[in-house]
Amino acid sequence: MSVSSTIEWTEATWNPTTGCHKISPGCQNCYAERFAERWRGVAGHPYEQGFDVKTWNDRLKMPLSWKKSRLIFVNSMSDLFLDDISEEFIKDVFYVMREASWHQFQLLTKRPQRMLEISKCIKEWPPNVWAGVSIESQAWVWRSEILKEIPAKIRFLSCEPLLGSLTLCLDELHWIIVGGESGVGARPINIEWVRDIREQCVQANVPFFFKQWGGVQKKKYGRELDGRTWDSFPEIVANTSTKQVSVLK
């Protein structure tokens, strides 16, 4: 079976690699690192090595055994495009995603330069693989411009944790996720930052998904914005997921 996910914008996670390195302010309170380091040194545990980078060959073919189509977030506990991960292994991941054509795979990175390099090394970017980058503040918007060079049918931004206001160029982008930081040390989010991104999406007719306000107790604050939830997804060619897919009106 797949690893079901409580992440609001996906259905399952697949981690052919685990572990990462901090690269920008959004990484400061990384939930994945916090979880993995709890198990460092526990013999036999998948995170016995903590948050050190590791590739898992025995996990590569997992999506091929999941017969029910779904949205799959690739590497919720890592970044596929780390320099530590070989080009050959990344190509193997792409081979599996191409073969598992009944799924939709969501790639998310803070390293779009490596993603672009890989896109030039594979024969063709699979139509069922979405390409996304994380942007936490205006200083990192340049990641979205590199993303636009990726030949994916769906390109998206994850503005989480949102640490400041953003002015985005939404041409050639198909989905925007926004969320506040959660957990110990969570930094505050300003409602006007969120409203402004939502309005940019409305004006550009780009689907907008508001994930959470966050905070130390994220369930307390929920995910409503101005009296409603915002759960739009990009349109996809076929109904390959149990998720509701629609374009924000």
Image: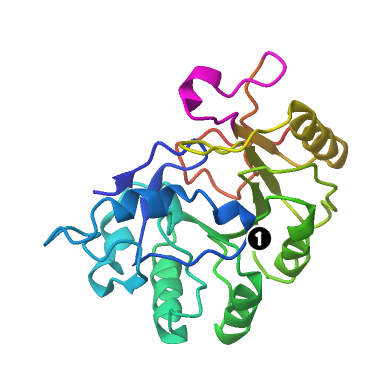
Residue 40 drawn at (x, y percent): 24, 59
- Residue at image point 63% right, 55% down: 25
The reply to whether the magenta stretch includes residue 215 is yes
The reply to whether the magenta stretch includes residue 170 is no
| Mark 1 surroundings within 10 Å by alpha-carbon count, few (fewer than 14), some (14 through 19), many (20 or more) | some
The answer to whether 89 appears left or right of 220 in the picture is: left
In this view, 106 is above or below 12: below
Q: Residue furthest right?
A: 203
Residue 115 drawn at (x, y percent): 60, 73
Given residues 159 and 156, the one toward you in this image is 159
- Residue at image point 35% right, 62% down: 51
Q: Which residue is label 1 attached to?
A: 153
The answer to whether 211 appears left or right of 190 in the picture is: left
Magenta part of the chain: 212-227
Q: Quadrant of residue 248?
A: top right
- Residue at image point 50% right, 48% down: 29
Asked if residue 249 shows in the view, the reply is no
In this view, 187 is above or below 67: above
- Residue at image point 60% right, 50% down: 237
The colouring scheme, among rainbow, by chain, secondary structure or one colour, is rainbow
